[in-house]
Amino acid sequence: MKKITVFVIGCALLASCTPKSEKMKQLAQENLEMSVDYPKQLKVLAVSEPDSAFGTGYFTKSEVKGMLQCMKVVTDTIMKRTGNMSRFDPNDHYVMSLAERQMKGMSEIRSLVMQNGKKGEFSGWKVKVDYQCVDPNGLPYRAERWCFIDKEGKQVYKSFELPIP
């Protein structure tokens, strides 16, 4: 009898968490739709499950490692396309767009590092959305957008994105 009670309570808790999780994922996607230049061209590739956030500057070591690896791939892509900048062409919209998005992303990563990654109090949730869209020059691009959502799961209060080559 005790096992059945524990099982029923566990199922109830799981069922009550799922709609909130889906709502936060939907909220992150809506935030993304409002931020891209051409929402009709937006294609969501993946959405992470909401994870506990302890301030907007705290990420796990594996998350930071993934972000830095992503930026390294972007740098390698730019260097390969420009012959280590020996064939740099400021009219190459792909390179210029990718470099601009990389600089914005690196600025966010630097600010994270400057905060020393100290774990603060529970501040809400974080959701990562991988997506593909089109930039103002009509060129397709891919990126990951990190959204920080309040404790109640009702509002995105900070977001940033990193390019994916």
Image: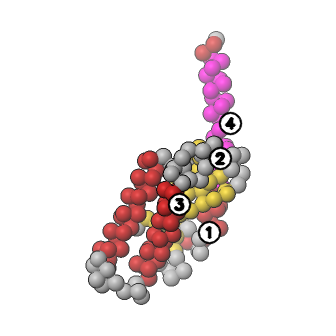
| Earlier sequence position, callout 3 versus callout 2 | 3
Task: Please tell me whether mark 4 sits on a helix, a strand or a loop.
Answer: helix
Tag count in the figure? 4
Quick check: can you spot residue 137? yes
Label 4 crowd bin: few (<14), some (14–19), many (20+), radius 10 Å: few
- Against 55, residue 94 (above or below) is below
Judging from the image, what secondary structure is the residue with disc 3 in?
Answer: helix
Q: Main secondary structure of the magenta part?
A: helix
Tell me if 46 is positioned left or right of 54 in this view: left
Q: Is mark 1 on a helix, strand or loop?
A: helix
Amino acid type at image mark 2: Ser
Residue marked by disc 1: 35
Q: How far apart are marks 3 and 4 (CA)?
A: 36 Å
Q: Name the residue under label 3.
A: 111
Q: In this view, does 36 lie to the left or right of 69?
A: right
Q: Which mark is residue 123?
A: 2
| Eye-nearest disc, 2 or 1 | 2
Q: Which residue shows up at 52% across the image and 76% down it? A: 135
Residue drawn where x is 38% and y is 58% of the image: 69
